[in-house]
Image (cartoon, rainbow, N blue to C red):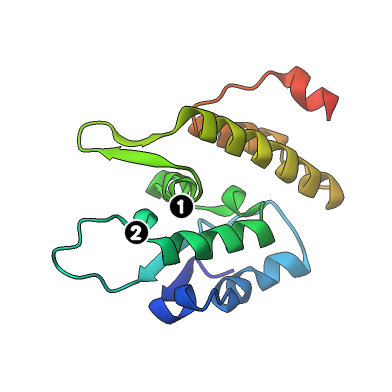
Amino acid sequence: MSDAISLTAEHLVQLNLAPAHAVLAPLLAQPTLDYAALKFDIDFPQEANDPRELSEIPEVRLWFIRLDSRYPWLPLYLDWEAGELARYTAMLVPHQFSPIDGIRYNPEALEIYVMNKVFNVHHWLQCHDLDGLKRLQQMTQMLGYELDDGLFQLL
């Protein structure tokens, strides 16, 4: 699996998921938890005086919303250490950026997002007979949530 999903403005504006599918196709053919550290390489031109982060640009956010609806398990495979999980989450969860604190997600929206990920990713792992509970728990911890093992026993 390639380690970068390269996106142009044309991909984003046309909601074209082909670059992601090309990178994820091997994983779809034979799901495994031997993950590569996926990153996004986004080339979206902005005016020099445009202060917005990519996650604040509607065309970029909409593309990521579509991507997430198609591949809700994708965050498991992102390069968390390089900040890709935080950036991916920012594309989907309302937030503010603070020069001191970095990304500050809307707490209620983040909670809904995390629980949605837990349910979707847990189901995907089960459907593919993958033991990824520890990775899923690590993902929620990276987003600031310590989930009790009892929740996963309910699932």
10 Å crowding of disc 2: few (<14), some (14-19), many (20+): some
Question: In screen coordinates, is 15 left or right of 32?
Answer: left
- Can you see residue 71? no
Q: Which residue is mark 1?
A: 91
> Residue 114 versus residue 31: which sits nearer the camera?
114
> Residue 68 versus residue 27: which sits nearer the camera?
68
Is 128 rendered above or below residue 122?
A: below
Residue 60 spot, x, y in % from top left: 43, 64
Which of the marked residues, 1 or 2, is nearer the chain's N terminus?
2
> Residue 126 versus residue 71: which sits nearer the camera?
71
Q: Residue at x 28, y 74 (%)?
A: 45
Q: Residue at x 55, y 25 (%)?
A: 145
> Residue 111 versus residue 5: which sits nearer the camera?
111
CA gap between label 1 and label 2 equals: 8 Å
Residue 28 spot, x, y in % from top left: 73, 66
Q: Quadrant of the C terminus?
A: top right
Q: Quadrant of residue 46?
A: bottom left
Is 1 rendered above or below residue 76?
A: below
Q: Quadrant of residue 55?
A: bottom left
10 Å crowding of disc 1: few (<14), some (14-19), many (20+): many
Q: Quadrant of the N terminus?
A: bottom right
Question: In screen coordinates, is 144 left or right of 57?
Answer: right
Is 77 rendered above or below residue 62?
A: above
Q: Residue furthest left?
A: 49
The amino acid sitting under disc 1 is Met
Q: Secondary structure at mark 1?
A: helix
Q: Secondary structure at mark 2?
A: helix
Q: Residue at x 39, y 47 (%)?
A: 83
Tag 1 and tag 2, C-beta contact below 8 Å: yes
Q: Which residue is mark 2?
A: 54
Residue 42 spot, x, y in % from top left: 38, 68
